[in-house]
Image (cartoon, grey):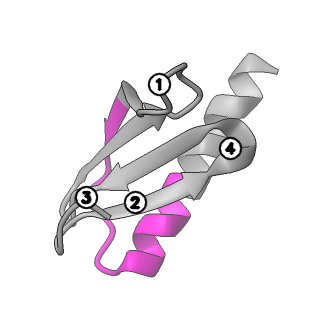
Amino acid sequence: MKSESRMLFAYPEHQIEIEWNGSATYNVFFTGTSTGDGENVNCFTDYSAKTMEEAQSIADEWLEEELKEIN
């Protein structure tokens, strides 16, 4: 977690982290870089989350859909 208003959801099996800014923006980071630092590879917006649990669900669903597209 980078600040009090930002939440980080980790998906180590996919080398992905999704950061929610506490509002509507989700930044997607690839953590499998040679330095181990996350590289911002995508972002998406969803205005419906009001709680951390809702944001986690949105991030989970987004990643699931993205994985379906590449498989």
Q: In front of the other: label 2 or label 3? A: 2
Q: Which residue is mark 2?
A: 8
* Viewer-proximal residue among 9 and 32: 32
Which mark's residue is nearer the viewer, 4 or 2? 2
Q: Quadrant of residue 24?
A: bottom left
Residue 6 screen position, x and y as percent? 24, 64
Q: Which mark is residue 44?
A: none
User: Which residue is located at x 75 percent, y 30 percent?
Assistant: 68
**Dot 1: element:** loop
Q: Which type of secondary structure does the marked residue at label 3 adopt?
A: loop
Residue 62 figure quarter: top right
Residue denoted by label 3: 47
Q: Residues within 10 Å of mark 4 (few under 14, many from 20)?
A: few
Nearer mark to the viewer, of 1 and 2:
1
Is residue 68 placed above or below 64 in the rendered structure? above
The kind of residue on which mark 1 rests is Thr
Q: Which residues are magenta?
A: 43-59
Residue annotated with mark 4:
64
Residue 30 location (% of width, % of height): 51, 30
Q: What distance separates the C-alpha of mark 3 from that of mark 4?
A: 19 Å
Q: Disc 1 versus disc 4: distance between alpha carbons?
A: 26 Å
Mark 2 and mark 3 in contact? Answer it, CB < 8 Å: no
Residue under the point 63% across and 37% down? 15
- Mark 3 residue type: Tyr
